Amino acid sequence: MIDNLHPLGSTRYGFGIRPQPSAGNPTLDTSFHSWEVDVDPEVDREDDLSSRGSARSLSFDNQLVEVWNARLHGNCHGWHGLTISASELYAAVVEEGPAARGAFENFWRRFRHDYVGLTCLGFLALFVLAATIGAPLVAALTAHGVIQQFPAGITMDGFPLPPWSHALTSTDAQDPNGPFFILGTDRLGRDVLVRLLYGARISLIVALAATGGALLIGVPLGLCAGYFGGKFDTVVGRAVEIAMAFPSMLFAIGLAAVIGPGLLNVIFVIVLFSWYYPARMVRSAVVALKGEPFIEAAVSVGSGHRRIMFRHLLPQLTAPLIVYATGIIAANVLFEAGLSFLGLGVPLPTPSWGQMLSEGVAEGLYRIAPWAAIVPGIALVLTTLALNQLGDSLRDALAPRGRG
Amino acid sequence: MGRFIARRLVAASIQVLVVTLIAYMLFYVISAVTGASPAQRVAGHGATPEQVARVAHLLGLDTPWYSQYWRFLVGVVHGDFGYSFQQRLPVAELLLPAAGVTASLVVGAAILWMLIAIPVGLVGALRPKSAWDRVSAIAVQIAISAPVFWVAPMLAYLLAYQPSQGKLFGLSIPPITFFPIQGYVPMSQSVSGWAISLTLPWLALAVGFAAFYARFVRAFTLEQLGEEYVLVARAKGASTPRILSTHIAPIIAPAIITLLGLDVGATLGGALFVEVTFGLPGLGYMAFSAIQNLDYPLTIGVITFAALMAVLANTVADIAQATLDPRVRIAGGVGNRADGRLR
């Protein structure tokens, strides 16, 4: 059994405890009962991401053992004078096995302790659920259509109803038997909640499709530009420079005005003004990776260009691309809302958040009915906030500082 | 150095040329395909086909787009941006006052966002993980995520409308009008009126940028604070303000100033949303209404001007960097970093 521990010193041994290779005794003596853990009490491990991956020293029987991840067991949370029993250590080493962790497992081990990131992920999952299942469900439950206008849903003066109110009687009193509007109504007497949920669909579709399009164009361009260099690189570099010199919002509204509103047109406009972000990022990353030994090795065993680019370089870029894409999705949610806000998004009467916001702002409606601007605005801010924060959390979990 | 500047200027002119060329193609070729005819718009809905053709001829719209483009280029070199269909005035005459409005909006907002960002970022860097740092990090994340077209009406509601109704953040106060909800007072009319009319737009524009810059300042300063020269300075008894002002500031200032130049340059082309929500007659607002009215000369005039500003800012930033850091001269520029964020 002890022999199973033999590869402890190898680099494959990624997770737990590695005895200092000591002369004459490469194996671990398991006759001890507990390990004294020597840690720096100054380090607040919950907070300092950089310390999560760093080595800690354990001493026992004059043998120095390093603990890589003291989160190995729950009882490692209490710090000073911590003990790990021999049986636990043995279990960790032998039963969990010394196999290296996969990239995803490594990521998950860090990410699952990031409650802010998890909250954002949960919120976004809710957002997707609300957009896909929630919208028709709520519409069916409330029996309010997405473009259904309730004559009793606006006051005599034509003002919308605040959240949590019933439809009105002919004397502008609330009618407890009438339809109930959880988030109130808009200027035309439509249910804001139903419209908000259907608007989430537009945000989701446009942001995901536009980001996918931008990655589909930008990643191969950046990959080829960085990998081949030379003339192609110059051309792509110039194209990116020129694209960035465009006053993009002015151009986007010009283009949207010329080609007309419509879901596909909005996606097209957004892709046109976001492909260069991933292209630039991928290019500079590839230029930095190109000189690494693993590429040299791939070349030396006769890998073709395509294989090197897609099997060797691209997987290295997965983590930064995921982080980057999260940020681009957030930016594109706002881009779509901005276009809709200016009346250049999906055509009416399909609801979208930007357009709901612009209806709330138009003619100063928000002064009398602030919720008309607050509700879609909060939905927009929360979604973008969750995406931005998730991006930051993913970055920390995928490439913590001090690990390159 | 001379060669570098020459190369940079050539690249800059190519950028502007391509931007205007694509703008031309967009508005003249695609609009011809989709049938949005400016001649029809100018002549009016009831115009006969003959009248429309005559208007098209008078405006030079019946010549091919490339000859129109050439005429436009020759005009721009002479400072003539063409003639607005809608306003019946030379575009250059319209651009100038609008550029003044946008400039006073952007420059004022830039000062404001730096005044917010520097202290917030510095305190965060000096006391990382402190309560203040955490709170400001949350505020920064929210400010980055909030779109300006939501922040602007919210500010107008909370700081302009509610006080005029006798409320301020839920408190009852005597009704006062701090700021107008919309509109612009030219500086020539009244300086204080100008500043008051621009306070909310400044704030609305500054919020998002302040958050970005607070992040930059914090990250740059934190990085420098870990350097050994700071340790040496501390060992010699230098106070924290002294370390910040005489050791760290000279190192991080060029990077921040470069970023600032790029952002201001990009925003000088029009802070569209802020101008639209506050009704400021700046470049963004003008371009927006010009696009809606199919007023192509005015639209292309603004786009050309905006591209000129952005490219100019990039070029100046590159040349300044190259002067300070010779490595840039060989590598070929720091590249364009100003992006078209939603402003």
Image (cartoon, grey):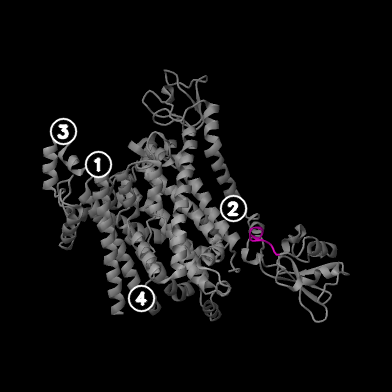
Work out whether mark 4 precedes mark 3 in sequence or the reverse, and give the earlier one: 3
Q: Element at badge 2?
A: helix
- Amino acid type of disc 2? Gly
Cβ–Cβ under 8 Å for marks 2 and 3? no
Amino acid type at circle 4 is Ala
Circles 2 and 4: CB atoms closer than 8 Å: no
Q: Is residue B52 above or below residue B186?
A: above
Report helix, strand or loop for mark 1.
loop
Earlier in the chain: of badge 1 and badge 4, it is: 1
Q: CA distance from mark 1 to mark 4?
A: 48 Å
Q: In the image, are marks 4 and 3 on the same chain?
A: yes
The x and y percentages for residue A91 are 82, 61
Secondary structure found at label 3 = loop
Residue assigned mark 2 = A117
Q: Which residue is mark 3?
A: B46
Disc marking residue B322: 4
Q: Is residue B276 left or right of residue B186?
A: right
Crowding around mark 3 (Cα neighbors within 10 Å: few <14, some 14 to 19, many 20+) is few
Q: Chain of mark 1?
A: B
The residue carrying pointer 2 sits among few (fewer than 14), some (14 to 19) or many (20 or more) residues within 10 Å by Cα, namely many
Q: Are marks 4 and 3 in contact (CB under 8 Å)?
A: no
Pair 1/2: label in front: 1
